[in-house]
Amino acid sequence: MNPLKKIYRFYSEGFRAMTVGRTLWLVIIVKLLLMFAVIRLLFMPDILGRLDSDAERAEAVRHSLTTPGKHDSTSKTSCIWISYQP
């Protein structure tokens, strides 16, 4: 028998036979989804959302990618990753 098919059958039969394990996996998945949602809200703010047009967003990203370490903090489109102040 194909080794990949054996591995798949092993895990599928194991998950099918679980009783308490299903509940634990559900708790783990819900917990991970909540953690990623909270982390995204806290640590990944919508920095480009404060710019008005797509052209300004494109310029800000282009500037950030092409001039590392040489950013003017007074410009609205200067290094959007470093000069962000909530």
Image: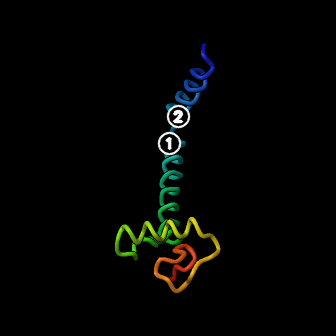
The secondary structure type at the circle numbered 2 is helix
Query: What amino acid does circle 2 point to?
Result: Phe
Who comes first in sequence, dot 1 or dot 2? 2
Q: Position of residue 34 (x, y in %)?
A: 48, 61
The residue labelled by disc 2 is 15
Q: Crowding near pointer 1: few (<14 within 10 Å), some, many (20+)? A: few
Q: In this view, does 58 lie above or below 18?
A: below
Question: Do residues under tags 1 and 2 come within 8 Å of each other at their CB atoms?
Answer: yes
Which picture quadrant has residue 81? bottom right
Disc 1 from disc 2: Cα separation:
8 Å
Which picture quadrant has residue 56? bottom left
* Residue placed furthest toward the top: 1
Q: Where is residue 36 in the image (x, y as percent from the top left)?
A: 51, 60
Q: How many labels does the image show?
A: 2
The quarter in which the N terminus is drawn is top right
Of 7 and 27, nearer the camera is: 7
Q: Which numbered circle lies on residue 22?
A: 1
The secondary structure type at the circle numbered 1 is helix
Q: In this view, does 54 lie above or below 72?
A: above
Of 20 and 67, nearer the camera is: 67
Q: Could you tell whether 28 is left or right of 56 in the image? A: right
Q: Position of residue 19 (x, y in %)?
A: 51, 39
Q: Crowding near pointer 2: few (<14 within 10 Å), some, many (20+)? A: few
Q: Which residue is drawn at 53% across and 70% down?
A: 63
Q: Which residue is drawn at 62% across and 70% down?
A: 68
Query: What amino acid does circle 1 point to?
Result: Arg
Q: Which residue is drawn at 47% across and 77% down?
A: 77
Q: Which residue is drawn at 39% across and 75% down?
A: 51
